[in-house]
Image (cartoon, rainbow, N blue to C red):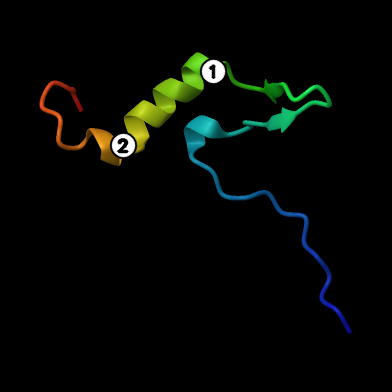
């Protein structure tokens, strides 16, 4: 007998609670957050390994 699939939401960062993203039939990205806010979150919380060695970038 197969296990039943649970319809649970994934664990997410509190700043991204309620974030939904999808691609419509024309290939355009539809998001529930503005791109500027998403980029700000990523810049603050994700380490960019290409920019680690640069001294002119503020952390």
Q: Is residue 12 above or below residue 2?
A: above
Choose between 25 and 35: the one closer to the eye.
25
- Residue drawn 41% across the image and 21% down it: 40
Front tag of 2 and 1:
2
Q: Quadrant of residue 26?
A: top right
> Horizontal and vertical percent for residue 31?
66, 23
Q: Residue furthest left?
A: 55
- Number of the label disc, if any, that sits on residue 35: 1
Query: Residue 58 at what x, y percent from top left?
Result: 18, 23
On screen, residue 46 versus residue 14, left or right, reads: left
Q: Is residue 21 left or right of residue 35?
A: right
Residue at which label 2 appears? 48
Which image quadrant is residue 1 in? bottom right
Farthest-out residue, right: 1
Identify which residue, 23 or 42, lies in the foreground: 23
Which quadrant is home to the C terminus? top left
Q: Which residue is at a point 59% across and 21% down the rendered structure image? A: 33
Q: How many marks?
A: 2
Q: Secondary structure at mark 1?
A: helix
SS state under label 2: loop
Q: Are marks 2 and 1 in contact (CB under 8 Å)?
A: no
Residue 30 pos. (x, y %):
70, 22
- x, y percent for residue 11: 56, 49
Residue positioned 77% across, 62% down in the render: 6
- Callout 1: few (<14), some (14-19), or many (20+) C-alpha neighbours within 10 Å? few
Above or below residue 3? Residue 13 is above
Which mark, by number, is residue 15? none
Q: CA gap, disc 2 to disc 1?
A: 18 Å
Q: Few, some or many C-alpha atoms within 10 Å of disc 2 (few <14, some 14-19, many ≥20)?
A: few
Residue 6 sits above or below residue 12 on the image: below
């Amino acid at each position: 007998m197969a296990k039943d699939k649970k319809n649970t939401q994934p664990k997410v960062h509190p700043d991204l609670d309620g974030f939904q993203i999808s691609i419509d039939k024309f290939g355009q990205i539809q998001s529930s957050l503005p791109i500027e806010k998403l980029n700000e979150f990523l810049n603050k919380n994700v380490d960019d390994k290409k920019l680690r060695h640069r001294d002119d970038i503020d952390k």
